[in-house]
Image (spheres, rainbow, N blue to C red):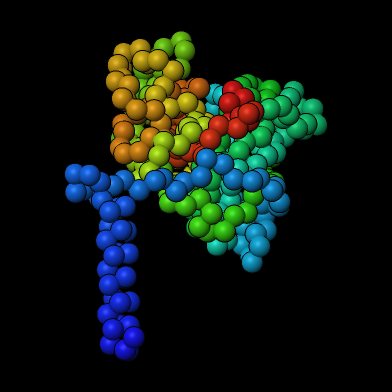
Amino acid sequence: MTKRKLVLSVVAVAVVAAAGITAVVLSTGGEPAARPCDIPDSVREQPASAKTAPGGGGIEVAEKGVSSTGLVSMGAVLRNTSDRVAYRTRVALEVNVSVDGLPPGPVQGPLMTMEIPVLVPGQRVGIGRPLIKVTATNKVTSADVDPQTTTWLPAGALGGFSPVTDTYESTSRVKAALPADAVRYTERSANCRALASRRTAVVFRDTTGKIVGDGLLPPDGRGNPAGSPQQRPASPSCSPGERSTWIVPLQDIPPETDDSRTELYSYCDLNLPPSDVNDAD
């Protein structure tokens, strides 16, 4: 076979191969077929120190705060300073309380542990929990946040996963015996499949930006707050696309809150774990 004939044969094979590939990516109607979602259903968890990632960086506490009235809540904003994905980061809240002037003692129980599903490189996320009811004899003497363990993954290990983003919309306050305030927000997900919702964190700030309250709550509220009817979204939290929803804090929103500074963070996981520490309250 001459060199010219060999070249023509190679070109012909390439054309046939390209045509076969085209047949695979085109649907019968001539439109591009949907690509399979590449976000895994699970990954192997290998807990390691959350403070130090392979290659440098880690999970750091960017800021923290404690509310001073009503049902005291402890909250913070964490940041992933590494070039790796932090999966299922366990965080402990370390709070000491003095009662009736006695020496401070630690607040203990399941509410003192939280788990953040995913933190991609550079991402910030809020955390928060209600702690104790403030009275004339109760006083929070110290509060801290301790990032404990996480599974460090290479940047591309979760396929096309991208953080779900939340934009604050409005706040409605209702005078009622039970908490009835509602914080409405827009949730946006560019992911190729529905993820598992593990609640939504809210961070309240005053006019200076200081954290004055926090919580981790189920999206879509706990029913319709009295006096402020809410419409449930057609899809659940962490679904692809855009949805408007709301949360109902476990206590009245702190009076010093600057509503325009309210931040929300949807906790979206690959799947629901057998035991969800975020569902403790």
What is the residue that sits farthest to the front in this orientation? Answer: 1
Q: Is residue 15 visible?
A: yes
- Report the residue at 44% width, 48% height from top: 38
- Report the residue at 28% width, 84% height from top: 5
On screen, residue 219 above or below 15? above
What is the residue that sits farthest to the top in this orientation? Answer: 177
Q: Position of residue 66 (x, y in %)?
A: 58, 37
Q: Position of residue 119 (x, y in %)?
A: 53, 49
60 displayed left or right of 124: right
139, 224: nearer the viewer: 224
**Which image quarter is the C terminus in?**
top right
Q: Is residue 213 visible?
A: no
On screen, residue 109 above or below 261? above
202, 32: nearer the viewer: 32
- Report the residue at 64% width, 22% height from top: 136
On screen, residue 16 above or below 32? below
What is the residue that sits farthest to the right in this orientation? Answer: 103
Q: Position of residue 182 (x, y in %)?
A: 38, 24
On screen, residue 239 above or below 78? above
- Report the residue at 74% width, 23% height from top: 100
Q: Position of residue 111 (x, y in %)?
A: 65, 28
What is the residue that sits farthest to the bottom in this orientation? Answer: 3
